[in-house]
Image (tube, helix red, strand yellow):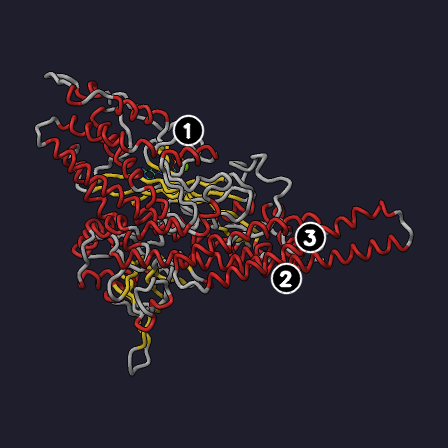
Amino acid sequence: MAIARFKALEQAQTRTTVPVKLPTEKVAEYYGSMTFNDEVMRSLLSPEAYLKINTAIQTGSKVDRDAADEVSAAMKSWAISKGATHYTHWFQPLTGATAEKHDAFFDIVPGSGKAIEKFKGSALVQQEPDASSFPNGGIRSTFEARGYTGWDPSSPAFIMENVAGTATLCIPSVFVSYTGEALDYKTPLLKSIELIDKAATAVVKEYFNRDVTKVSPTLGAEQEYFLVDEALFNARPDLMMAGRTVFGHAPAKGQQLEDHYFGSIPPRVNAFMVDFELEAMRLGLPVRTRHNEVAPAQFEVAPTFEEANLACDHNALLMDLMTKVASKHKLKVLFHEKPFAGINGSGKHNNWSLSTDTGINLLGPSSKPKENLRFLTFFVNVVKAVFDNADLLRASIATAGNEHRLGANEAPPAIVSAFLGSTMSRVLDDLEGMKDLNDIKLEKGDNVYLKLGINKIPSLLLDNTDRNRTSPFAFTGNKFEFRAVGSSANSASPMTILNTIVAHQLFQFREEVDAILEKGVKKELAIMEVLKKYVKISKSIRFEGNGYSDEWVEEAAQRGLSNLRTTPEALGVYVRPASIELFTKYGIFNEAEMHARYEIELENYIKKVQIESRVIGDMAINHIVSTSLKYQTQLVENVKGQKEIGIDPQYFEPTIELIKRISEHTSKISRLVDEMTEARKDANEVEDLATRAALYGTKVKNYFEDIRYNVDKLELIVDDDEWPLPKYRELLLIR
Ligand code: ADP
Ligand code: MG
């Protein structure tokens, strides 16, 4: 019998719901209680220091030494009062995970042997972890691997509980090399946020609202994930090593009944959700909705949107937290984009907009025509930016995991297009078809908006029937939703790109409008003229149809849209001269950083495919072929026995057929695994990273499906008692 599998199954089936200790206080009392937030700072800091910190948060200015010393002292006593014994700079290196290096607060007074608690301003502002074991794409050679983490005052410090009631003060930080190059996701994100503030504020202030002094990108990241019982997870080497199942026959009941979506949440899962949400709330993460997703065992959590930097930190923190809390419930969270073949994958829908310091959502339509011109301005500029930079957006979400998802079951394809909805499509069509703006004669007392036809945009576009789940980039009434982002991604990467391309577009827009204004044209007409031009240019990026269909792939090709299917192809966009020019122009990345990122992502890709390939080889030979041959021997014995006692051969013919099929599949598997290993060897010998990645993505990866096909066939033949791996129906049935 397959002992490991059945032991795991028994464990999974006899699990009970882990009780969650609910707080006695009201939400308002514990929400953010583990964060060094504005309220805490106000109460603990001198008015001068508080003001300095606040200015730093608002404007990105540096915090001086005195203020840093005061903040660190306050932070320390606050953290210790909350049970923290250590502190760490918490940062997001390009490995994709978050990183921390804990230092104790206490120190020994030299000579006296006495312990004192110590945390200076300098330690708050900067920490020096060894950068050599984080990916740096050749920026630093290992022997001089020094990197610095630096405090980001705009994201509140927080306390994470560790085991046994101890806790650590976590200080959100950037991570840069000794020579100043960014080694993390946060650094370029912060730069892009500053850039889009500059670009968008100029447009709003100049043309619409004089009182606006700041524009911030906002992000609400809907997070999809799967849950699997811990014991079953541990019985699947592929889940453990690659985060996804490389084999597994589709279950008799998958998602075809569509009864899981928004269905009732299983009690054990519900307990897990309540538990991590409580922890999240204490850390000031505004988690708001929870529900089942389309696939069995798939779920979603969505927060209320926040300023983009905070939202990115919070999403990364949420993922950490979920992983941690899940183990209490004997569950494993799968953030992989495609953990199960033939079933929906997981994304992280990045809802993005722009918000002014006066509270205006710049992508929110309004009932006032004047405000609608502003809305239209931002709306059209975003569409134009997506049209011009579709390939960069594609690159920003390119990973090995997302490659399995994009273009597969129920997921947006690798083609970037924008869905606007019927109302906004009509508005843009009307705008395009409008007569030449030079011909519009404005009389004194005319309503310019009426003449321009933009008094008609309904103030509420949040119509749920007008949604398109198949689009990678969709307008959803008052924000754009970048849906092609992978579930395991760090949102900072797509957000950095989106902020930058939209900022670039807004700078261009202002130049063009100003040029027309200089000719003495009325402002509204000048704006409309440029928007009309943009609508014309960017038409081919708009697509309202079914993005999952094969016809779209063909049509997109005819329209000249790119379809960068593989990750290495997509990553190549980063090092195109035009991309480098764009990002270096605004100082978001320098050239070395762009090359470094490109290399790091290629390396990540190679490693992931390599691991998958090895896992496939090991499991196919050591688990599947060996088990199948053992079972085949039993069948052979059986047939021999039947023969011996004189059973009519017609009755054991089907068994002989099974024996043959086992031989056929096992021999194919053995041959394919050998060939795949050779392909890996060949690829490893290639020096050039891009070529090696491409080889892994084609020559090596091409074997995955064939091997899987044969393994999945064997799953249907071999005695269930002997099958070594938990099956899909077992993994996906979560109680
Ligand atoms: P759905 O898209 O499923 O209808 P919601 O409209 O509630 O759900 O929004 C989904 C996500 O979009 C939530 O995280 C929400 O906070 C976020 N969101 C809403 N408005 C904005 C905005 N102006 N900027 C960024 N995100 C937003
Ligand atoms: Mg949504």
Circle 2: residue type: Asn
Label 3 vs label 1: CA separation? 51 Å
Q: Residue 664 got which mark?
A: 3
Circle 1: residue type: Asn
Is the residue under label 1 in contact with that under label 3 (CB below 8 Å)?
Answer: no
Task: Residue at 44% x, 36% y: name it.
Answer: 553
Q: Residue at the bottom extreme? A: 111
Q: Residue 622 got which mark?
A: 2
Would residue 116 be found to the left or right of residue 692 on screen?
A: left
Label 3 vs label 2: CA separation? 17 Å
Q: Which residue is mark 1?
A: 464
Q: Residues within 10 Å of mark 2 (few under 14, many from 20)?
A: few
Q: Earlier in the sequence, mark 3 or mark 2?
A: 2
Circle 3: residue type: Glu
The image quarter in which residue 302 lies: top left
Decide which of 632, 498 is in the foreground and name it.
632
Q: Position of residue 637 (x, y in %)?
A: 81, 57
Q: Position of residue 371 (x, y in %)?
A: 22, 28
Q: Is residue 102 above or below residue 322?
A: below
Q: Residue at the right extreme? A: 646
Q: Is mark 1 within 8 Å of ligand 1?
A: yes
Q: Position of residue 412 (x, y in %)?
A: 44, 39
In the picture, which quadrant includes the C terminus? top right
Task: Residue at 74% x, 56% y: name it.
Answer: 631
State the SS at label 2.
helix
Task: Residue at 86% x, 55% y: name it.
Answer: 641
Q: Residues within 10 Å of mark 1 (few under 14, many from 20)?
A: few
Would residue 429 be found to the left or right of residue 336 on screen?
A: left
Q: Is mark 3 within 8 Å of ligand 2?
A: no
State the SS at label 1.
helix
